[in-house]
C-alpha cells in the first residue's frame, strides 16, 4: 500500500482517504502535556497503542516521556524494532509462546508487563528464566473498570509471588478506562477518587507484606489532572492528548488542565452528490466508529453512516459541497482509527495551505497479538 | 507482522487473536452459491471488498464467478497484482490522480467502473484516452440505498454521455445495501421489489435513448434469491455468503435460498478472570463492531465490549472459561473485520481438531483509496 502523499507535496495532492496529522497542533499538544507533567512532578509514559509509531514515540521521549505503554507484545516488538527502548505492556500476557518472545525482547530493551493471576506470574517467571532476562512487573488492580486486575486486597499476595520468583516488582497498574469518557468533570473526578482509594488499598496490602511499592501508574487523557492531583499516581499513561478525537472533545473540560487541539484528521473527497446530500469516500474502513461517527471539520454538516467505504453528508448550517471537494473529518476515536491506516501524512502549515513534512509508518498497525 | 500460524500447525498453536477460516465450511458456502447462480442462470461476481484476497478471488472464479467487484481502485490494483483479471470497481472514482492509475490498470486487466455524474464520466473518458485503454462503464442508479447513484430517469442521459465519449456502456449498477440487513424476508423482498422497479425505469430511460442496456448488476447476501427471481438482475454481487457473520445470521432465512454457514472466526484467548467474568484478548482492533459485537461460538456466554483490545465474557447458560482457554468469536460484520488483519489462517478439519492448510494474505487490507 503506497502512502497517500510524499514529503514536499502540497495538501491538495494528498490522495483520499488519508490519515493526516496537523503537525503544528500536535506539537502544541505534545508541549502542553510535557509541561504539565514537569510542573506536577509526575512521570509521563504515553500510551503508544494510540499512535503505534516509532517516530512519534521518539518525539514523546525527546519531550520528556520516560518511555511508552503498549497493550500487546507484538506492539512492543514493532516499536522496539524502531528503537524504542523502554516499553510497558500494560496488559496481561498469558500464552507461553508469547511469553517466550517477551523473554527474548527483554534481553534488549527495558520491558515491563502487568500481571493479575498466579498462572500469569508463574509463566512469566519461567519464560524470563529461560531467556535469562528480567522485566519490571506491575500488579494490575481493578480500580473501577471491571475488566482486568485483581481486587485491591489481593494485590499483596500477588506482589509477594512476583518477589518470591525473583522478579522485579515495579508497582501497581491502576487504569480506569471508563472514567476517561464520563462527560462531566465532576463524574470523572468522582471516578478517580474511587480509583485512588482502590490504589491506596492495594499499596497498603503490598506494604503490609513487607514489599515496597515503587509506583502507581495509570490515568488517561480524560482524568490526568485529577490523577496527578491525587498524589498517588506517580506516572501518567495518557495517549490521546496528542491527537485528540471527537469523543474526548465532547468531555466537559477539566478545571486547571491544559486543553488539547484536534491534530488528527481523515482527509476525504466528495465522490457523489444527491439532491440534498453528498457522499465522501471515507467510511468505517477509514475511521473507527466505536465512539461515534466522525465530525466534519470547519463546515456545519451532519456526517451520517454510509457503510464501510462511504460517508453521507447532510445539510445543517452549510450545504453539502460538490463533487471533487475536500472534506476533513475528525475521527470519533483516534486509537482504532490509526489502526486502520498504514501511514500518517504529517502536514506543516495547516489543513488549507500546508505542505507534507513527513510520512510516518504506523509501525504497529494490526499488532493485536 | 508475522502470521499467527504456519502451514501444518495444529489449531492449538494458532496465536491469538487471529482471523481463522473454517475451510470445510467455506468450501460448502462457495459451492452452494455457485450452484445457485448456475441453476438460476445469473452471473456471479462476488464482492471482494469482503475478503480482499487474491487467493480467495481465484477460488471464486474457479468455481464459476465471472470476476469480482471491489469498492476502491487500490483494491483493484492489489488484486490485479495477484492475478485477478476481471474486476468491477462498483463505485465512483473522481480524483484525477486515481483516474490516471485506473487508465493504466485498464491496460492490463478487464476493468469496469461505476459513474453517477457528468464530471465523473468526463474525467474517466479523459483518463482512459490518455492511457490508451478502455473500461466497461456502469451507470449507478439509486435503487433505494440513498447513497450514490442517479435517479432512474436520469440514467438515460448519463448513458448517452458514456456512449458519446466512446466508452463501453455496460449497464446499470443497482445495489441496495440497506435491503441486505432487513431482518424479515418479507421486508427484504419488498425492498428488492422497489429496487427492481427503479432498475427497470433506468433500463427504460436508457433504451429510450436508443442505447442497449446489456446488464443490471447488484444484489447481496441478504437479497440474492429475490434479485435472481426478478429476472432483471443478470449478475449478483453477493460477497458475505462465503464467510457469513453474526449480522447476516440474524436475518430470517429467505425461502428457497441456500443457507450459509459461519466460516470466519476470530480465535481469542482468556487472559484474565474475575469473579463472574473472563477477559479475552480480542477487542475492536480485532473485530469490527459496526454491525454489533461478536457472538461467542459454541458456548452460551455474553460478549460485552471491553474496548480496543479486550472482550468481556459474562455468564449465561455457561460459566466463563479459565485463564488460557481458547474462545472462538463470530464477527458481527465480516468485511471490516477482515480489513483489520494481515492474514487468514485457513484451517482444515474444524475448530477443535483442525490443522492449518494455508495462510493467505489479506492482499488489499487497508486499500481504501
Image (cartoon, coloured by chain):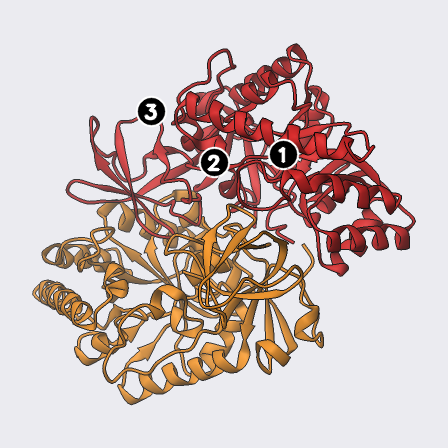
Chain colours: A red, B orange
First of labels 2, 1 by sequence position: 2
Which image quarter holds the N terminus of chain B?
bottom right
Q: Residues within 10 Å of mark 1 (few under 14, many from 20)?
A: many
The one nearer the camera, B333 or B323, is B323
Q: Could you tell which of marks 3 and 2 lies nearer the N-terminus?
A: 2
**Disc 2 designates what residue?**
A14
Image check: A132 left or right of B14?
right
Residue A153 placed where, x, y %?
A: 66, 39
3D distance between C-alphas at marks 2 and 1: 41 Å
Question: Hey, which residue is sitting farthest bottom in the picture?
Answer: B39
Placement of A262 over or under A322, stated as above or below: above
Is residue B309 among the parts visible in the rendering? Answer: yes
Residue at the spot x=44%, y=45% of the render?
A286
Give the foreground label among 2 and 1: 1
The mark found on residue B187 in the picture is none
What residue does disc 1 label? A174
Circle 3 residue: A298
Would residue A174 be found to the left or right of residue B257 on screen? right
Q: Residue at x 38, y 47 (%)?
A: A283
Which one is nearer the viewer's eye here, B332 or A143?
A: A143
Q: Give the letter of the chain under mark 2.
A: A
Amino acid at each position: 500500500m503506497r502512502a497517500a502523499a510524499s514529503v514536499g507535496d502540497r495538501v491538495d495532492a494528498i490522495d483520499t482517504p488519508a490519515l493526516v496529522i496537523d503537525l503544528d497542533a500536535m506539537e502544541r499538544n505534545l508541549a502542553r502535556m510535557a509541561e504539565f507533567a514537569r510542573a506536577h512532578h509526575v512521570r509521563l509514559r504515553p500510551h503508544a497503542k494510540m499512535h503505534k509509531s516509532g517516530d512519534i514515540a521518539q518525539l514523546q521521549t525527546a519531550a520528556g516521556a520516560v518511555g511508552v505503554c503498549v497493550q500487546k507484545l507484538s506492539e512492543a516488538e514493532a516499536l522496539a524494532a524502531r528503537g524504542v527502548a523502554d516499553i510497558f505492556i500494560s496488559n496481561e500476557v498469558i500464552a507461553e509462546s508469547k511469553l517466550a518472545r517477551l523473554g527474548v525482547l527483554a534481553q534488549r530493551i527495558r520491558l515491563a508487563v502487568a500481571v493479575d493471576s498466579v498462572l500469569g506470574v508463574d509463566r512469566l517467571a519461567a519464560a524470563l528464566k529461560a531467556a535469562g532476562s528480567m522485566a519490571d512487573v506491575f500488579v494490575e488492580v481493578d480500580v473501577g473498570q471491571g475488566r482486568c486486575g485483581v481486587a485491591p486486597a489481593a494485590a499483596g499476595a500477588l506482589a509477594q509471588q512476583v518477589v518470591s520468583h525473583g522478579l522485579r516488582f515495579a508497582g501497581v497498574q491502576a487504569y480506569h478506562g471508563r472514567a476517561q469518557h464520563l462527560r462531566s468533570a465532576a463524574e470523572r473526578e468522582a471516578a478517580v477518587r474511587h480509583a485512588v482509594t482502590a490504589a491506596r488499598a492495594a499499596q497498603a496490602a503490598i506494604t503490609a507484606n513487607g514489599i515496597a511499592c515503587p509506583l502507581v501508574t495509570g490515568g488517561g487523557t480524560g482524568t490526568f489532572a485529577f490523577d496527578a492531583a491525587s498524589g498517588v499516581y506517580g506516572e501518567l499513561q495518557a495517549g490521546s492528548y496528542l491527537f485528540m478525537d471527537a469523543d474526548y472533545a465532547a468531555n466537559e473540560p477539566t478545571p486547571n488542565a491544559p486543553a488539547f487541539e484536534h491534530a488528527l484528521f481523515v482527509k476525504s473527497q466528495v465522490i457523489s452528490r444527491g439532491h440534498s446530500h453528498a457522499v465522501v469516500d471515507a467510511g468505517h474502513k477509514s475511521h473507527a466508529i466505536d465512539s461515534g461517527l466522525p465530525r466534519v471539520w470547519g463546515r456545519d454538516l451532519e456526517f451520517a453512516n454510509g457503510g464501510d467505504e462511504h460517508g453521507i453528508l447532510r445539510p445543517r448550517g452549510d450545504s453539502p459541497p460538490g463533487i471533487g471537494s475536500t472534506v476533513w473529518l475528525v475521527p470519533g476515536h483516534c486509537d482504532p482509527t490509526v489502526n486502520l491506516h498504514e501511514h500518517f501524512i504529517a502536514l506543516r502549515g495547516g489543513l488549507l495551505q500546508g505542505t507534507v513534512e513527513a510520512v510516518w509508518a504506523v509501525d504497529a498497525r494490526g499488532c493485536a497479538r
